[in-house]
Image: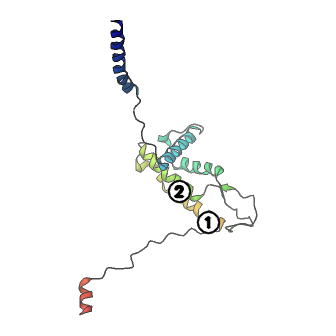
Amino acid sequence: MSSERLNDSAEGSSRSTPQKQQQQQPPPAPPPLSRYESQKRRDWNTFGQYLRNQTPPVSLSQCNCNHVLDFLRYLDQFGKTKVHLHGCVFFGQPDPPAPCTCPLRQAWGSLDALIGRLRAAYEEHGGSPETNPFGNGAIRVYLREVKECQSKARGIPYKKKKKKRNQIKAEDPAKSSKQAA
C-alpha cells in the first residue's frame, strides 16, 4: 500500500508540475526595437538629461527652441567633423594635406537627423505639433547656417538632388496607328 501511495503522489506531482511551469513562465518579451527607434529613444533620453542638468532644471513643458539651440551647440564638443576656421590655411579644402588646430564639430547631416528623431519623439510623448520646439523655424535657420558654414569651410558644396522626371512618355495609341497608316 505504501508503494501505491508513492506512485499516486509521484503521478500527482508529475501532473501538477507542468501546470506550475506554465504559470511561472514570464510573458513573452516585446520585439526588439529597430535601429531608428533605439536611436530615437537614446536621443530623447539625452535631451531630457540635458534639460534636467540645466540650472535651474527645465521641464519639458517649459522647453522652447532656445533650449534646443543650446543643446545643439552643446553637442558640438562631441563632434568628429573638422570644420576649418576662416583664418586657417586649409579653409575651403576638402582634403587638407596636414593637420590643423581647427575644432571638431557635429556634422550638419547628423544634427539634421537628430532633430528629425527628436521632433518625432516629442509628439510621441504627448506634445502637440504646434508647440513642438524641434519644428520651430529658428531650428531650420540654424541647421541651414551650419550646413552653409560647413560646406564653405570644408570645400564641399551641398547640392540639392534633382528630382528625376519621367522623360519617356507613353505614346497615344491612336496617334501611332494613324502614323502607321
Q: What residue type is labelled 2?
A: Asp
Q: Choose between 24 and 57: the one closer to the eye.
A: 24
24 versus 179 height, above or below: above
How many residues crowd mark 1 within 10 Å: few (<14), some (14–19), many (20+)?
some
Asked if residue 133 shows in the view, the reply is: no
Is tag 2's residue or tag 1's residue first in the polypeptide sequence?
Answer: 2
Query: Residue lying farthest top?
Result: 1
Indicate the quadrant containing the N terminus: top left, top right, bottom left or bottom right. Answer: top left
- Locate residue 146 relative to residue 24 in the image: left or right: right
Amino acid type at circle 1 is Ser
The percent coordinates of residue 143 (x first, y second) are 55, 58
Where's the C terminus, which quadrant?
bottom left
x and y percent of residue 180 in the render? 26, 91
Q: Quickly name the residue at label 1.
A: 151
Q: Say which of 112 and 144 sits in front.
A: 112
Badge 2 marks a residue whose secondary structure is helix
Which residue is found at the position 54% from the left and 44% from the top?
47
User: Quadrant location of residue 30?
Assistant: top left
Check the image and name the residue furthest to the bottom. Answer: 181
> How packed is label 2: few (under 14 Cα within 10 Å), some, or many (20 or more)?
some
| Image coords of residue 57 (percent x, y) | 56, 37
Question: Compared with residue 8, is residue 150 higher up or lower down, i.e. above or below?
Answer: below
Between residue 24 and residue 43, name the one nearer to us: 24
SS for tag 1? helix
User: Residue at point 49% right, 41% down?
Assistant: 60
Q: Which residue is denoted by mark 2 in the rendering?
A: 112
Q: How many marks?
A: 2
